[in-house]
Image (cartoon, rainbow, N blue to C red):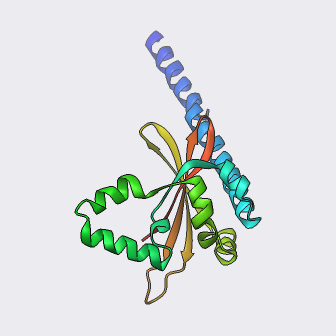
Amino acid sequence: MRIQKIVSVLFLSLLISSFIPSKDASQHVDETEDITQVWKKFLNIIARQDKSGFKTLSNQSIRCYLCLENTIIEQEELDKKRETDPEWYTTLYTKDIYISIDDFIKNDYDLIFNTVFVQILKERKTIFYKREIEEVAHYEVLVTTTEPTLYHEGGQHSFQFKKIKGEWKFNEIGTIP
């Protein structure tokens, strides 16, 4: 009889605890709401072309492959490195791809965040994906910017935000594929 009471109490405790959200689950909900608000703020800043606000919301450097070849001159420079530098690939992905925020704003911001692109980002569905990189929280915000067709697989832009000193900072822009 005593064993039956203990088993019943344990079962009831287990049942009740399964309905109480875990701290991790509520933290995930809070972070999702938080990154959603950061994304809305990001969209408002780029829609207003607020470069000062953009700088404040961004990391000190942005990982940006697009920034290395978004002009004809840059494309030619990259082609020349490929042809002449045996270490071009390593240098590209360990050094060149990281653009200081000031250089990004000066050279790449207007090329990337034009009116048409910003409107696409505001209108399209976003997907938020959290991951940990070296024990630091990151969120990827994925936006399908080119719809798939019979002749093209479509494409997405990825915007990464990194938690730095308790704040989400824009850290990377990329494309898929």
Residue at far right of view? 48
Give residue 53's position: percent from left, percent from top: 73, 53
Residue drawn at (36%, 60%), measured in percent from left and top? 92
Q: How many marks?
A: 0
**Vertical placement of 146 versus 150: above or below?**
above
Residue in the foreground of this view, choosing between 51 and 4? 51
Quadrant in the picture for residue 18 = top right
Residue drawn at (45%, 89%), measured in percent from left and top? 150
Quadrant in the picture for residue 124 = bottom right
Give residue 177's position: percent from left, percent from top: 42, 71
Give residue 27's position: percent from left, percent from top: 61, 37
Residue at far top of view? 2
Residue in the foreground of this view, choosing between 85 and 170? 85
Residue in the foreground of this view, choosing between 77 and 36? 77
Residue at far left of view? 86
Q: Is residue 1 left or right of residue 108?
A: left
Give residue 73's position: percent from left, percent from top: 46, 76
**Vertical placement of 30 versus 5: above or below?**
below
Residue drawn at (22%, 63%), measured in percent from left and top? 86
Residue at far bottom of view? 151
Residue drawn at (71%, 51%), measured in percent from left and top? 37
**Vertical placement of 91 versus 60: above or below?**
below
Quadrant in the picture for residue 103 = bottom right
